[in-house]
Image (cartoon, rainbow, N blue to C red):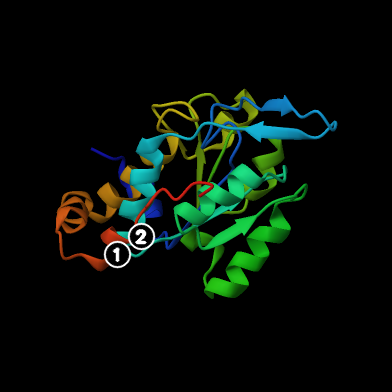
Amino acid sequence: MIESALAERARRIKVLLFDVDGVLTDGSITVIPGPDGSGTEVKSFSAHDGMGIALAHVAGLKVGWITKRVSQVVALRARDLRIEHLYQGQHYKVQALDQVISEEHCTLEEIAYVGDDIIDLPVLRKVGLAVASANARPEVKAMAHYVTPNPGGQGAGRDAIDLLLNARGVLSQTIEQYLDPENVEAKKADIGVGNM
C-alpha cells in the first residue's frame, strides 16, 4: 500500500525522467582502449528497467533521460527503448527539465525524476515527485519523496515505474495490455536492435 501523500504525487505524473549512470546502470563506467588512443565505453542496463519503460509507454507516460556524460551506448539504448527525451552532456540538468516542460506542455508537478547523486539535486528539488535510487548519496535520499527498493542498474527504474502505475491503479491492467499480442505499443517495445 502506497502512503496517501506519495500516491497523490505519483498520480499527477505525466513525464518520468531519469539520470542514467547509477540509476539505469550500476554507475560503473568501463572504457576499453583502442589502438589509436580512442576508447569504447561500456555500460550495463537492467532488462527489468527496459520492460518497465515499455509498460510506461503502454500506460501513456512519456520518458526521458538526462545525463552529464555523452555516450554512444546511452544513445543506442535510448533508441531501442524509444525514449522521447534524451539529453546528454547536461552539467546543469534544470535546462533540460525546462525544455521537457516546454515540449510536453506540462507543469513541474506532473514530472517525476529519478536520481542518485548531487548533480541531480537541482532537478529533484523542483519536480512534483523526487525519487532516489537505493544506492543514492545520502543528500539525495534525504530530500526524496520515495527511495526505490532496488539500486541503480538492478531495477530502480522499474521500481519508479511500478510506483506510478500502482498509484494510478493500472499496473495489472497495463501488464495485461502489454501481454496482448495485438497491442501495437507493446510490439514496438525494446526490440533490441543494439548496434546492428
The residue sitting at 52% across, 71% down in the picture is: 106
Q: Position of residue 15 (x, y in %)?
A: 47, 60
Disc 2: which residue:
57
Farthest residue, direction front: 35
Locate the N terminus by quadrant: top left
Relative to the observer, which residue lies in front, 132 or 69?
69
Residue 5, visible in the rendered structure: no
Q: Within 10 angstroms of label 2, few (less than 14), some, or many (20 or more) residues?
A: many
The reply to whether discs 1 and 2 touch (Cβ–Cβ < 8 Å) is: yes
Relative to 102, residue 188 above or below? above
Question: Is 69 placed left or right of 155 in the picture?
Answer: right
Relative to 109, residue 74 above or below? above
Farthest residue, direction right: 37
Relative to the observer, which residue lies in front, 22 or 75?
75
Residue 105: give its label.
none
Q: Position of residue 161 (x, y in %)?
A: 37, 46
Camera-nearest label, 1 or 2: 1
Amino acid type at mark 2:
His
Residue 196, visible in the rendered structure: yes
The residue sitting at 43% across, 34% down in the picture is: 46
Q: Within 10 angstroms of label 1, few (less than 14), some, or many (20 or more) residues?
A: some
Disc 1: which residue:
185
Q: Earlier in the sequence, mark 1 or mark 2?
A: 2
Q: Secondary structure at mark 2?
A: helix
Amino acid type at mark 1:
Glu
The quarter holding residue 155 reads: top left
Q: Position of residue 48 (x, y in %)?
A: 35, 37
Relative to 117, residue 128 above or below? below
